[in-house]
Amino acid sequence: MSRPARMARGSAPAAADAAWHAVAFREIWQARLIGMDQAQRELERWRAAQGDDPGSLLALRLDLMTVRLAPQGVQASPRYLELAARLQASGDRDGAVIASSLAMGTAAYGGDVLKAVATFEQLLPEIDKLADPLERSVALWPALYLYQTLGNPAAYLRHANQLLVLARSMGHKGMCEAASANLGIALYLAGDELAALRVLKGVLDSSGGVGGWIRFSAVACLAGIHHALGNFDKVLPLLSAWAFPSRQAGLDPEAVNQFHALGAEVHARLGRLDDARRCLAFVEQVPPPQRSYDVRCQLALSRAMYLQALGQPAQARLALDEAVQLSAFFSASHRVLDSHYWRSFAQLARDLGDWQAAYGHLDRYRELEQQKKTLASEARRMVQLESGAADIAMLDEFRRDPLTGLANREQMRVLGDEWLARQRAEPVVLMLNLRRFNAINEALGHEVGDAVLVAVADRLRAATAVFGLALVARVYADQFALAVPRDDGDASIRQLAATIFAAPLSVRGHLVDISAAWGVAMAPAHGTAMQQLMSNAEIALHQDRQSGTGWTLFSPQLRKASARQLSLVSELRRAAQEDEFELLLQPKFALADDRVTGAEALIRWNHPARGTVPPVEFIPFAEDIGAIRGITDWVLRRAMQITRELQQARLACQIAVNVSAHDIAAAGFGETLQRLLAETGARATDIRLELTESVVMNDPQQVAGRMRDISAMGFEWSIDDFGTGQSSLSYLHRLPLHELKIDRSFVRNAGDSKATITLLKAAIDLGANLGLSTVAEGAETQQEWDLLRQLGCDAAQGWLRARPMAVDAFLRWLAARR
C-alpha cells in the first residue's frame, strides 16, 4: 500500500523517503486552506513521523511550516533566513527558495520595503524554476504584500493573475478562492472598483467550504474598498458579522489588524463610540512590531476621530498629527494608492477648525487621486503588454457586467482609450442615472428591478446601433455610460437621448416609465483620455441630478466652487455657535379674507466682515458638502423659540421651516425634532416642515415613511416648489401632506399666458382634490393676487403684501393686525 494511503488512515509516514518532505509540505499547506486546526493536526502527524534527525529534509520542511503557521511579522524574517540557509545546505533548493521569499515578505513589516522588494526580485528567476505549482504559488505569494506596500499596482496585478493561473492548473478550490480574492484586490488597485467588489463578493458566496482566513481576507478587502469609496454604511454589516473573531488562528494578522483599525474609524464617524473604543482596544493590544505602517497610520487616524467625537479636540489634534507623520513612511506610490487617508485627514482637520491644514490635505488628496488614475492606467497597459492571451481573457471575465452583459467601467475605459488612440471620430461621452429606480425596486421587488436594468441595457444597445461605432456600459448600480461619435452634431445626440425612454419599458407584465438624468462630456474640449471624459461626464451628471434639467454639458466651472463660497463655508460652524444667523419671517395670507395663516422662516447670515450674506451664497454649497444639517437644527430651534414667544403674546402663528434631503435622509431626524421640542417648550403643531418636490420624488418610499413618523408627532408637512419636479400621483396621495406650495414660476406673469393659467389651475385643483390647502409663492402684483383668488387658490405670499421681517418687527406687525 502507498504511503499516502497509509496517511489517509492515520498512520505516520516513514521519514526515510526523501520525497516525503514535499508531500508533507503540500498536505499541510492545503490543510491550512481548510482551517488552522486542520493544518496543525497535519503538522503534528508528520512531526510524529520525522524521526530523530532534526536536520532531515522532512524535519526542516516541517520547521518551515511551523514558522509559516505562526503569526507573521518582522520577527519571523530572521527565522526564515536561518531555515533558508539550512535547507540549502541540506540540498533542498526548492525549500530554500520558498523560505527566502517568505523572509522578504515579513521583512517589509519593518518598513524597509524597497530593500525587501529588490531582494525578492533577485529571487524571481529561482522561483520560476520551481516545478511544483503549489510550491511556486507559496513562493510567489509574498509578492502581493510587497507590491501593495510599495504601491505598484501593475506588479500586484501581474502576480495576482499568475497566482490564479497556477491555482486553476492545480484545480484546488481553496487555492482558487484565495487567488480570486487577491485578483479582486488587484482589480481595485487598477481602478476597477465594480469588478473588484463583484469578485470579492463571489469569493464570499462560494468559499463556505474553505478556510475562514480566505473569507476573512475577502471581507477585509471589501470593507477597505467600501471605506475608500465613502460607503461607510456598507462597512457596518461586515463589522457586525466579522469583527472580534473568537479564534484568530490562521487569519492573516495584517488583515485582522487593518480591519479593526478601519472599523474604529467607521464607528467613530457614525457616532457608535462604544464600538469604536472596542475596535481601538483590539488593535492597541497587538505588539507594535506586528503592526505595519498602514495599520499604525489607520490606528492613529481612527483614534483621532474617536477623540474628536468624544469632545476632546486637543488630544484628537495630537493623534491626527501622529497619523500624518506615519503617512510619511509610505512609499510615494503607496501614498497614491491609499489617497483616502488624506481625504480623512482633511475632514478631521476641518472638524477641528484647522481650515488651513484641511485645505492642504484636500489639495494633496486631489493630487494623489489624479496620480492614482494615471498609475492605474499604466498598470492596465503594462499587464496587457506583458500577459499572455489566456491571462488577458481571464481579466476580461471581470470586465463585463454579469447582469446586463454590457461592458463595465474598466472595459469602457480600455475600449474608449483604443477609440481615441486610433483617431476615429471624436466621441461624446454620456453618463445617465435612472430616476426613481429605488422606488421601482421597493414597489415591484428586486427581481423586477434587475429585469428593468436588463431592459434599459437592451434599450441603450438598440438606440446606439444606428452609429457605426458606439460603446455602452453599466458603470454602477443604476448608472450607465454611452460613447457615441460626434459626426451628426450635438442636437442629434440630445434628440437620441430624449427618445430612448420616450416609451415605457415592458418588464414581466409591468409597464415601467423611466426617465434619466444626463451628464455629457465631449472630446477633445473636455478630455483627451476616456478616464477624463468619463470623470467630467459624471461631474455634469451630478449637477444634472441636483438641477433636474435632464441634460447638463460639462464645463470647467462645475469642477470648482468659488473662493468666496469656500471661505464662507469654512465659517459656518462658528456662525451657528455665535448666533450670526438671523431668522426673517414672511407672512402667508388667506386669499378669501386676508387673514395671516402662517409665516415662512427665511435665514440670513449677518457676517461680521462681509455684511449680510443671502442664503443662495451658502445654502447650496452647505448641502453639497453635507453641512446643512447643522443649519437646519439652528433654524428649527429658533423657529420653535419664536412660536413659544408668539404663544405667550397670544399671537399664535404657525411657522414653516425648509428641510433638506440630508435632513430627511438622516435616521435620527425625528429624535432631533423631539429633543428640540423638549428644550424649547414648543408645540409640534406650530411648526410646518417644507420639503421640495424633487427631494420627495428622489426616494419617495423612504421619504414617505419618515414623513409619516414625524407627522405622528404632530408636525405638518408641505410640498415646496410644487410643479418643478416629477411627482407621481400614485406617491403624492400616500404622503401625509397638509399643503402644496406652488412654485413662483407658475405665478409670475401668469395672466399673460393661457398655457400658464391652465397649468396653474391644474395645480390648484389637484391640491383641492387631494384635500390639501394651496399656497402660491412669489405673488408680486395685484393682477397675480386677483388671478389666484379667481382660480380658487387658498393662500399666497409675496412682497406685494409683506416682505420678510425681522422677528421683533413681525411680532409688532402681527399684534397691530390683531
Image (tube, helix red, strand yellow):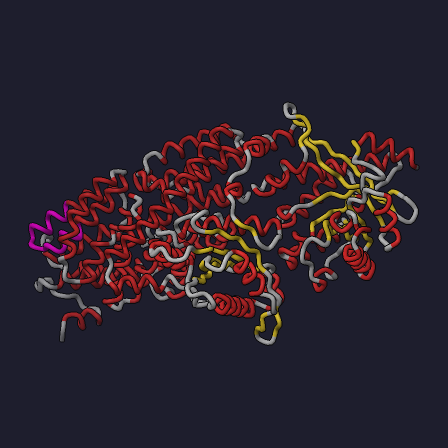
In this rendering, position of residue 604 left or right of residue 592: left
Q: Which residues are magenta?
A: 82-99
Q: Is residue 244 visible?
A: no
Q: Point out the image quarter for the C terminus.
A: top right
Q: Residue at x 68, y 57 (%)?
A: 704
Q: Is residue 322 visible?
A: yes
Q: Is residue 801 above or below residue 742?
A: above
Q: Where is residue 340 shown, x and y percent of the image? A: 43, 42
Q: Is residue 98 magenta?
A: yes
Q: Is residue 601 above or below residue 202?
A: above
Q: Nearer the viewer, residue 597 or 26?
A: 597
Q: Is residue 126 magenta?
A: no
In this rendering, position of residue 119 left or right of residue 156: left
Would you identify the image quadrant in which residue 610 lies? top right
Q: Residue furthest front?
A: 488
Q: Point out the image quarter for the N terminus.
A: bottom left
In this rendering, position of residue 558 left or right of residue 135: right
Q: Residue at x 55, y 35 (%)?
A: 562
Q: Nearer the viewer, residue 418 or 309?
A: 418
How many numbered discs?
0
Magenta region, mostly helix, strand or loop? Answer: helix
Q: Nearer the viewer, residue 93 or 558?
A: 558
Q: Nearer the viewer, residue 491 or 18?
A: 491
Q: Residue furthest top?
A: 609
Q: Where is residue 195 shown, x and y percent of the image? A: 40, 59
Q: Where is residue 150 shown, x and y percent of the image? A: 29, 43
Q: Where is residue 483 shown, x and y percent of the image? A: 45, 58
In this rendering, position of residue 75 left or right of residue 812: left
